[in-house]
Amino acid sequence: MTISFSRLIGLLLLCLLLGFAFLLPLIHHGDPLEQDLLQMLHAPSGANLLGFDHLGRDMLPRLSAALRLSLGLAALCVMSALLAGVLAGVFSALYGGWLDRLLSMLGDMCLALPGLLLVLLLAAIAPDSPGMLWLGISLVLWVEFFRVTRATLRPIVQAPGMQASKLLGFSAFYRFRRHLWPALAPVLTTLTLFSFSSAIMAVSALGFISVGVRPPTPELGLMMTELLPFAWEAPWLLMQPVIALFLLLISLNLLMKEERK
């Protein structure tokens, strides 16, 4: 199996960002919350590669911690949505009837409000709660997994091979592994990458408007808000979370580009 140049670049970028987020704390023991007011807006140097922010905090561990938070929270949201959506889609395709109507109605209810508004409503119930942020984004994402799984599997459930396996008494797990999963796996790979990208954008957008994550917790969107007033005085500070978010999203999109072929 060959790998295209675009996918190789995307995979390399993603691995570099993951390494920066999760391996940097093993070799650099800086505290992302520690302040040194004498170093406020200090430019990058050999001793401090990314400089210091407006409160004298080292940007290197802060950017690493922000990436860990965005990646971890987005991964948790996507895994929750994937599990709930695929299970609901499989049961809906297999059994139909009232269960299909109930699950479809729940999906329509989640889509009745714009995703950002739904998250904001949940965040208003429990302010400053990352748990509500996770719940809101998961509720937005699971519907796509449910609908794609349901639409992909419904024709296969009625196929002769699936019906023959059922009549021969094969287990539900065997039927899923033999007939359903081969058709579902390629679609889920692309949808998971797309949902991961959407979750990262949602976390950053909500952090930009100070929802779910509060200072001094480092988060990409929140860092942009904090550093925006110093854009002319110290533009290198604002560009760091912007470039990190851009590279993260472009790496996922390059991987998706290959998966869609």
Image (cartoon, grey):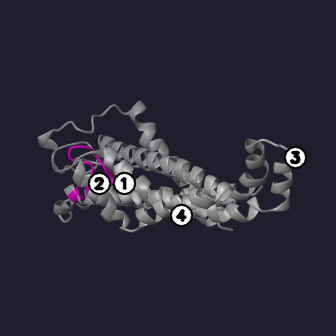
Q: Earlier in the sequence, mark 2 or mark 3?
A: 2
Q: Are marks 3 and 1 in contact (CB under 8 Å)?
A: no
Towards the viewer: 48 or 208: 208
- Figure quadrant of residue 36: top left
Q: Earlier in the sequence, mark 3 or mark 1?
A: 1
Q: Amino acid at mark 1?
A: Gly
Residue at disc 2, secondary structure? helix
Is residue 113 shown above or below 237? below
Rounded to the nearest angstrom, the CA distance separating label 2 from label 3 is 48 Å
Q: Are marks 2 and 1 in contact (CB under 8 Å)?
A: yes
Viewer-side label of 4, 2: 2
Name the residue carrying label 3.
168
Name the residue carrying label 2.
122
Q: Earlier in the sequence, mark 3 or mark 4?
A: 3
Mark number displayed over residue 136 = 1
Classify mark 1: residues with Cα within 10 Å, few (<14), some (14-19) or many (20+): many
Q: Amino acid at mark 2?
A: Leu
Q: Are marks 2 and 3 in contact (CB under 8 Å)?
A: no
Q: Position of residue 89 (x, y in %)?
A: 60, 56
- Residue 13 shown left or right of residue 260 in the figure: left
Q: Amino acid at mark 3?
A: Leu
- Figure quadrant of residue 224: bottom left
Rounded to the nearest angstrom, the CA distance separating label 4 from label 2 is 29 Å
Viewer-side label of 1, 4: 1
Helix, strand or loop: magenta stretch = loop
Q: Are marks 3 and 4 in contact (CB under 8 Å)?
A: no
Q: Earlier in the sequence, mark 2 or mark 1?
A: 2
